[in-house]
């Protein structure tokens, strides 16, 4: 998938208040929970 593309599937939120697709530059602008930050940090290091 290219950076500009977003998946067409609908997200189902179980534990989160909100969801949106973020670009790489936006990942550090969100208040992540510690468990979510671990994932975001791995994405940033890719």
Image (tube, helix red, strand yellow):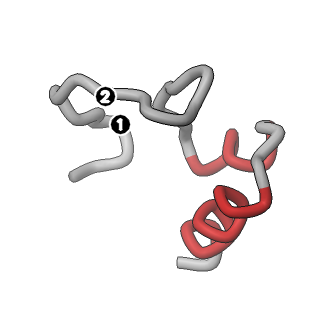
Task: Spot the residue most to the front.
Answer: 14
Badge 1: how crowded within 10 Å, few (<14), some, or many (20+)? few
Residue 15 position, x and y percent, is: 54, 35
Tell me if label 1 and label 2 are in contact, CB under 8 Å.
Answer: no
- Seen from the viewer's position, the closer of residues 42 and 1 is 42
User: Within the image, what quadrant is residue 13 found in?
Assistant: top left
- Which mark, residue 4? 1
Q: Decide: is 6 above or below 18.
A: below
Give 38 or 46, whichever is nearer the viewer. Answer: 38
Give 27 or 32, whichever is nearer the viewer.
Answer: 32
Question: In the rendered view, would you say 39 is above or below 4?
Answer: below
Residue annotated with mark 2? 11
Secondary structure type for disc 1? loop
Which residue is at 55% across, 41% downward?
A: 23
Q: Could you say where residue 44 lies in the image, as x and y percent from the top left?
A: 63, 67
Q: Earlier in the sequence, mark 1 or mark 2?
A: 1
Left or right: where does residue 6 sit relative to residue 15?
left
Residue in the picture at 57% in, 21% down: 18
Tell me which residue sits at (22%, 23%) in the image.
Answer: 10
Q: Which percent across, then down, holds residue 26?
A: 69, 39
């Amino acid at each position: 998938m290219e950076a500009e593309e977003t998946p067409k599937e609908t997200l189902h939120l179980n534990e989160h208040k909100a969801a949106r697709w973020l670009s790489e530059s936006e990942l550090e602008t969100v208040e992540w929970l510690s468990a979510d930050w671990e994932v975001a940090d791995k994405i940033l290091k890719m």
